[in-house]
Amino acid sequence: MTNSNHSPFILLPVLQNVALDRLQRAVAAYAAGDYTVTVTCQDERGAWGYLKNGSSPEYGVVLTDQEQFCSCPDRMYRQLVCKHMVILALHILRTLPPEKAAA
């Protein structure tokens, strides 16, 4: 479900706080189409979804103004901004309706 009230600014902390190596891996993987991104909800509070890479495990990702979560080991055990969070943020930003992308 997509709501046009979604603000892209909620996604900025993920992109601002990710380590450069993870950002590079995320951009490369997203550009190559390596991940299937399923957005389950997107509204003014943020975005929720699942990411899957081939036969690897599927990871749940939540990006809101209150929470940044991914079920992968990098986030769960190391508390790092992971590539899955970055890929969801990039996917949301690249699929914004034209009126939101211009804002």
Image: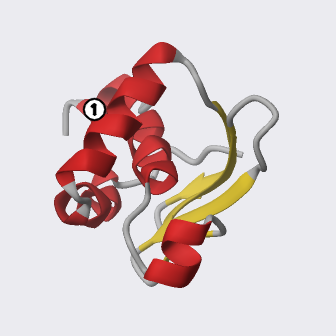
Residue at x-position 42% and y-position 33%: 96
**Looking at this view, is 13 or 26 the one in front?**
26
Residue at x-position 46% and y-position 62%: 44
Q: Quadrant of residue 79?
A: bottom left
Q: Position of residue 38 (x, y in %)?
A: 70, 39
Residue at x-position 25% and y-position 54%: 15
- Residue 27 seen from this side: yes
Residue 77 lies left or right of residue 38; in this view the side is left
Q: How is the image coloured?
A: secondary structure
**Looking at this view, is 41 or 90 the one in front?**
90
Q: Position of residue 4 (x, y in %)?
A: 49, 44
**Looking at this view, is 35 or 73 the one in front?**
73
**Looking at this view, is 11 or 32 the one in front?**
32
Q: Position of residue 88 (x, y in %)?
A: 50, 46
Q: Amino acid at mark 1?
A: Ala
Helix, strand or loop under label 1? helix
Q: Quadrant of residue 56?
A: top right
- Residue 100 seen from this side: no
From the viewer's perspective, is residue 10 above or below residue 39?
below
Residue at x-position 59% and y-position 69%: 73
Q: Residues within 10 Å of mark 1 (few under 14, many from 20)?
A: few
Residue for badge 1: 101
Q: In the rendered image, which quarter contains the C terminus?
A: top left
Q: Position of residue 46 (x, y in %)?
A: 49, 63
**Count of marks overlaid on the render:** 1
Residue 62 lies left or right of residue 19; in this view the side is right
From the viewer's perspective, is residue 62 above or below residue 21?
below
